[in-house]
Amino acid sequence: MRGYHYLMRLAHLLNTLARFSSALVAQHLAIGVRAFIQFVRSTYSGPWLDPPTVKQRMERPFQLRFT
């Protein structure tokens, strides 16, 4: 059940991202579900997310900006 729970949480995250981002919706429609999941996975595991920079940004307070 724990694995199922994690999969449902991941599905909810992807659903939320797709619903609230027009760029992601366009990307999802253009490449399909499987390619979109692979795109998101490669984005999160890619080398451009270097750990020191991520850690530094996570330690700063978050600020939402609306344009």
Image: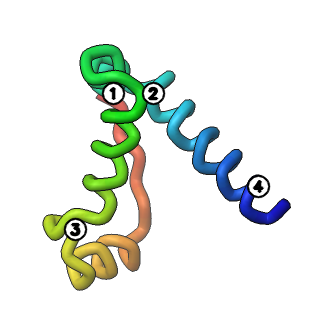
Q: Which mark is residue 5?
A: 4
Spatial CA distance of label 1 from label 4 is: 24 Å
Please say if the residues under marks 3 and 4 sit with CB atoms less than 8 Å apart: no
Q: Identify which residue, 28 or 52, lies in the foreground.
A: 28
Instruction: Determine contact: label 2, label 3, CB under 8 Å.
Output: no
Compared with 33, 41 (above or below) is below
Q: Position of residue 41 (x, y in %)?
A: 35, 53
Q: Earlier in the sequence, mark 2 or mark 1?
A: 2
Q: Earlier in the sequence, mark 2 or mark 3?
A: 2
Residues at marks 1 and 3, CA–CA distance in whole angstroms: 19 Å
* Number of residue marks: 4
Give the residue type at disc 3: Leu
Q: In what quadrant of the picture does the C terminus appear?
A: top left
Badge 3 density bin: few <14, some 14–19, many ≥20, Cα 10 Å: few
Disc with the residue nearer the chain's start (3 vs 4): 4
**Real-space Cα separation, disc 4 to disc 2, in angstroms:** 20 Å
Question: For the residues carrying marks 4 and 2, which lies nearer the camera in this image?
Answer: 4
Q: Residues within 10 Å of mark 2 (few under 14, many from 20)?
A: some
Relative to 36, residue 10 above or below? below
